[in-house]
Image: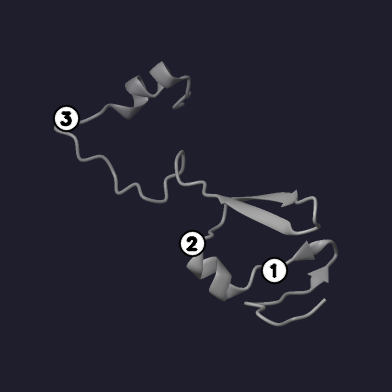
Amino acid sequence: MSSEGVDSESKVSGNQANIPARIRNELDIDDGDTLRWHVEDDGTLRVQVVQQRSGTFSDFDGYEGDRETKVTAEHDAWGVDAN
C-alpha cells in the first residue's frame, strides 16, 4: 500500500483514531457529529459525516420574543417541576 496522495494520517490507539485537524476543519466535523463507516467491495473505506446541528443549543442566542414568560407556571406545562 502506497502513501502517495495521502492527505493526512493518524494512528489507532485503544481502538480509537484521531481525525486530523485539517480534515476536521475542511469537513466541518464537530463534537456530537456521527461518522458512518462503510467498507466497499474492493476494500476501500468510505466515511460519511452526519452533522448533529439540530436539537442542540449551540446556535441559540436566547429568547427575543415580545412577551415575558413565567418560568414557574409555564415549565410545568412541559413536565418540568420548577420546585
Side (left or right) of 19 relative to 57: right
Instruction: Tell me the amino acid under the disc marked 1.
Output: Asn
The number of numbered badges drawn on the structure is 3
Mark 1 in CB contact with mark 2 (< 8 angstroms): no
81 and 9: which is toward the camera: 9
Side (left or right) of 19 relative to 24: right
Which residue does the image show at 42% across and 51% down from the upper left?
58
Q: Secondary structure at mark 3?
A: loop
Alpha-carbon span between mark 2 and mark 3: 36 Å
Query: Which of the two marks, 2 or 3, is nearer to us in this view?
Result: 2
Instruction: Tell me the amino acid under the disc marked 3.
Output: Arg
Q: Say which residue label 1 marks.
A: 18
User: x, y percentage for residue 39?
Assistant: 77, 52
Q: Say which residue label 3 marks.
A: 67
User: x, y percentage for residue 50?
Assistant: 56, 48
Q: Which mark is residue 28?
A: 2
User: x, y percentage for residue 33?
Assistant: 57, 51
47 and 82: which is toward the camera: 47
75 vs 11: above or below: above
Which residue does the image show at 43% across and 20% down from the upper left?
78
Which residue does the image show at 30% across and 49% down from the upper left?
61
Which residue does the image show at 74% across and 81% down from the upper left?
3
Q: Residue furthest bottom?
A: 4
Mark 2 packing: few (<14 Cα in 10 Å), some, or many (20+)?
few
Alpha-carbon span between mark 1 and mark 3: 46 Å
Alpha-carbon span between mark 1 and mark 2: 15 Å
8 and 81: which is toward the camera: 8
